[in-house]
Image (tube, rainbow, N blue to C red):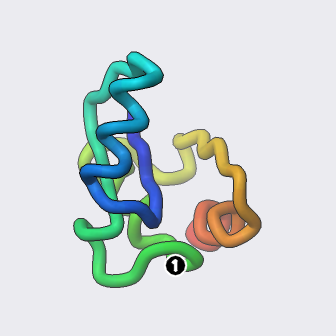
Amino acid sequence: MVCGDSGTRYWLLSRLRLATCPLAILVSAGDVAKGKARSQPYLLGARLLGVNPSECLVIEDAPAGILAATREG
């Protein structure tokens, strides 16, 4: 699982703990130079997973995130 977000690592981890969400890889705003609506968080997540970005599924709740996820295919 990759959670890419514009939030901080602390914010993301606290939400994931509440949801009891298993986590393999976490990409937060502090891990990239440019967050949403840029595609860096999603590209980094795919690279860390060792998969092609075109093989990934992104579930988003914001137009900027959808744009960022689709920008690089």
Counting from the top left corner in percent of width and height, residue 44 is at 32, 60
For the C terminus, the quadrant is bottom right
Q: Out of 19 and 60, give the one closest to the viewer.
A: 19
Q: Residue furthest right?
A: 63
Residue under label 1: 38
Crowding near pointer 1: few (<14 within 10 Å), some, many (20+)?
Answer: some
Q: Residue furthest bottom?
A: 33
The answer to whether residue 38 is left or right of residue 58 is left
Say if residue 73 shows up in the picture. no
Task: Please give the name of the residue rendered at 27% of the width and 39% of the height, measured from the top-left corner.
Answer: 25
Counting from the top left corner in percent of width and height, residue 19 is at 46, 22
Q: Is residue 4 above or below residue 51?
A: below
Q: Is residue 57 above or below residue 18?
A: below
Task: Please give the name of the residue rendered at 30% of the width and 82% of the height, measured from the top-left corner.
Answer: 33
Q: Is residue 72 above or below residue 1?
A: below
Q: Quadrant of residue 42?
A: bottom left
Counting from the top left corner in percent of width and height, residue 9 is at 27, 54
The answer to whether residue 5 is left or right of residue 72 is left
Q: Amino acid at mark 1?
A: Arg
The answer to whether residue 10 is left or right of residue 62 is left
Q: Is residue 34 above or below residue 48?
A: below
Say if residue 52 shows up in the picture. yes
Task: Please give the name of the residue rendered at 53% of the width and 42% of the height, measured from the top-left corner.
Answer: 56
Question: How many discs appear?
Answer: 1
Task: Please give the name of the residue rendered at 32% of the width and 61% of the height, measured from the top-left corner.
Answer: 8
Counting from the top left corner in percent of width and height, residue 13 is at 30, 40
- Give the structural element (helix, strand or loop) at label 1: loop
For the N terminus, the quadrant is top left
Q: Out of 50 and 15, give the one closest to the viewer.
A: 15
